[in-house]
Image: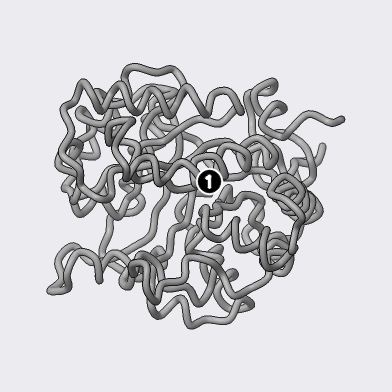
């Protein structure tokens, strides 16, 4: 049996390319040219779950929301590969929907193996998973216990898909003592270490415990298998000092994602967060400055594109994917 892609990543210290080599999205030829025919050559971009999912209704609550894509995963993977992506983000409800309704798999393991085959066939070599929300709570809290099935799904998915990392965060805004937060983040990180996936802590304006880079470093300090997940959107809304990002060292940043937006609006935080995250270059964010700071902090990619936009969700796949890739590539080549 061939080793999972994550094992190869560990062994080489690099990222797998669309052509199966090590380095950026496309393997370098001996003469310095690029293999692959994506529109932007060697841009190292990850298609976040919301960027490639089309007509979803994210974070709308138990009634009337759809956190899974209406587009078949095989078509999504094929089109992402054609455009130039070799990295993908997947959220737990979408994974479960794919297993149950697209593949009609007999069991979860079989469904995940089918999903892995689809990704491999389309040169998707780097996988991000999300999202756990109840981990900051005590082990015996019923809300945390209710999320165990999701955690098990993500653990098995991380193992079979060879996921690089999982994104978690305190999006429900639970107030937790820092000592408890450290311990519970370390518990999650140690659990995912067993399947070869790192854990990235994403922090938000609604999180009462972590609002700055120093606080995020403190929260993640008790494990070697976790670190920061930096989202430009939340960095901007929190007023994160980019100099604090520059001061980070290799290994502090597990993963990143970016988009564009407006510094101030009259919309509620929730509405703005799910409906107004623009394509890079369409808003006011200092994307180049942030990218420079993140690079100085020791991160080299892939660069996640998280486009949560009511307008973007209306695009057909053939329009959405090239637009996103071209918009993101101009900042990270």
Q: Residue 212 falls in which quadrant of the image?
A: top left
Q: Residue at x 39, y 76 (%)?
A: 64
Q: Is residue 243 left or right of residue 199?
A: left
- Residue closer to the observer: 168 or 96: 96
Q: Residue at x 60, y 56 (%)?
A: 95
- Residue closer to the observer: 44 or 257: 257
Q: Residue 279 falls in which quadrant of the image?
A: bottom left
Q: Which residue is mark 1?
A: 129
**Residue 102 percent coordinates (x, y):** 71, 67
Q: Tell me if residue 64 comes above or below residue 300 in the rendering.
A: below
Asked which colour scheme the image uses, the reply is: one colour
Q: Is residue 298 left or right of residue 241?
A: right
The answer to whether residue 329 shows anywhere in this view is no
- Residue closer to the observer: 67 or 128: 67
Q: Tell me if residue 55 comes above or below residue 237 in the rendering.
A: below
Q: Tell me if residue 293 comes above or below residue 33 in the rendering.
A: above
Q: Residue 135 falls in which quadrant of the image?
A: top left
**Which element is circle 1 on?**
strand
Q: Is residue 133 left or right of residue 45?
A: left
Q: Residue at x 69, y 44 (%)?
A: 125
Q: Which residue is farthest right?
A: 1
């Amino acid at each position: 049996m061939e080793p999972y892609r994550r094992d190869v990543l560990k062994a080489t210290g690099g990222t797998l390319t669309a052509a199966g080599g090590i380095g950026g999205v496309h393997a370098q030829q001996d003469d310095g040219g690029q293999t692959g025919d994506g529109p932007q050559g060697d841009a190292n971009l990850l298609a976040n779950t919301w960027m490639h999912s089309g007509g979803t209704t994210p974070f709308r609550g138990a009634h009337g929301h759809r956190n899974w894509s209406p587009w078949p995963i095989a078509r999504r993977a094929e089109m992402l590969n054609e455009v130039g992506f070799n990295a993908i983000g997947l959220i737990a409800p979408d994974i479960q929907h794919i297993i149950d309704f697209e593949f009609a798999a007999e069991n979860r393991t079989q469904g995940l193996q089918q999903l892995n085959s689809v990704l491999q066939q389309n040169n998707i070599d780097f996988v991000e998973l999300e999202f756990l929300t109840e981990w900051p709570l005590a082990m015996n809290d019923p809300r945390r216990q209710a999320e165990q099935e999701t955690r098990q799904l993500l653990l098995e998915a991380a193992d079979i898909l060879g996921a690089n990392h999982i994104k978690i965060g305190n999006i429900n805004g639970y107030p937790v003592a820092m000592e408890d937060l450290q311990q519970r983040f370390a518990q999650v990180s140690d659990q995912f270490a067993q399947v070869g996936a790192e854990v990235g802590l994403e922090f938000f304006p609604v999180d009462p415990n972590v609002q700055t880079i120093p606080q995020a470093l403190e929260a993640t300090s008790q494990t070697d298998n976790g670190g920061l997940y930096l989202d430009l959107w939340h960095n901007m809304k929190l007023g994160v000092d980019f100099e604090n990002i520059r001061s980070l060292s290799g290994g502090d940043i597990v993963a990143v994602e970016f988009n564009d937006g407006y510094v101030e609006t009259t919309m509620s935080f929730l509405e703005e967060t799910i409906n107004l995250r623009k394509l890079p270059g369409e808003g006011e964010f200092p994307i180049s400055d942030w990218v420079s700071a993140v690079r100085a902090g020791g991160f080299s990619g892939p660069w996640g594109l998280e486009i949560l936009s009511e307008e973007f969700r209306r695009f057909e796949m053939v329009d959405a994917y090239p637009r996103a890739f071209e918009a993101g590539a101009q900042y990270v080549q």
